[in-house]
Amino acid sequence: MEVTDLPTVNASLNALAAVLLGAGYAFIRRGDERRHKACMVGAFCTSAVFLACYLVYHYRVGSVAFTGQGWIRPVYFAVLITHIVLAATVVPLALLTLYRAWSGQFDRHRRIAKWTWPIWMYVSVTGVLVYLMLYRL
């Protein structure tokens, strides 16, 4: 695998994290705590691998300029900016949410998960969108 393959790997990891987050949410809504836990730990591990690959890619390649023109340009930057800001917030939120579940603080876990889950899902989905706009348009 070449470093140039990492954006596709990263988009795939973001997509997988979104699928796991969605499944984890569905499982907990049905009361299946075992499968919920497996999906959420899987989403966290997938996101951690994404972060490592992302850092390696940008260390080696640097930033990549968006070349799109017209109406897509402000759309891209609006998605990118919200993605970056929320991606920075989701790391401590996810860590705290997982810690509270792991330590049995389920009331506190549920309270913060109501914020963490939609932010994490948004970051995962917009990560795929940023990839598509940056590398596939």
Image (tube, rainbow, N blue to C red):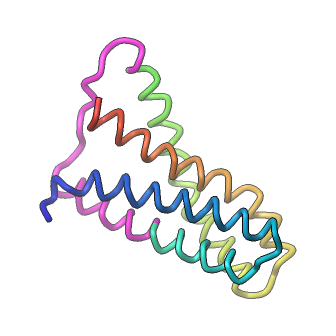
Q: Is residue 66 magenta?
A: yes
Residue lying at the far top of the rendered structure: 70
Q: Nearer the viewer, residue 17 or 23?
A: 23
Q: Find the residue positioned furthest to the bottom.
A: 103
Taking the image as shown, residue 10 lies to the left or right of residue 84, namely left
Q: Which residues are magenta?
A: 47-72
Is residue 126 positioned above or below 107 on the image?
A: above
> Which residue is at a point 78% across and 72% down the rendered structure image?
109
Residue at 67% in and 78% down: 35
The answer to whether residue 18 is magenta is no
Q: Quadrant of residue 20?
A: bottom right
Q: Quadrant of the C terminus?
A: top left
Q: Main secondary structure of the magenta part?
A: helix
Could you say where residue 100 lies in the image, as x and y percent from the top left?
Answer: 73, 79
Left or right: residue 56 compared with residue 79 = left
| Left or right, 84 with reference to 38 | left
Give the vertical position of 82 relative to 25 (above or below): above
Q: Residue at x 51, y 52 (%)?
A: 124
Question: Which residue is found at the position 44% from the left and 56% from the top?
Answer: 14
Position in image of residue 77 (x %, y %): 43, 28
| In the depicted structure, whether residue 82 falls above or below residue 74 | below
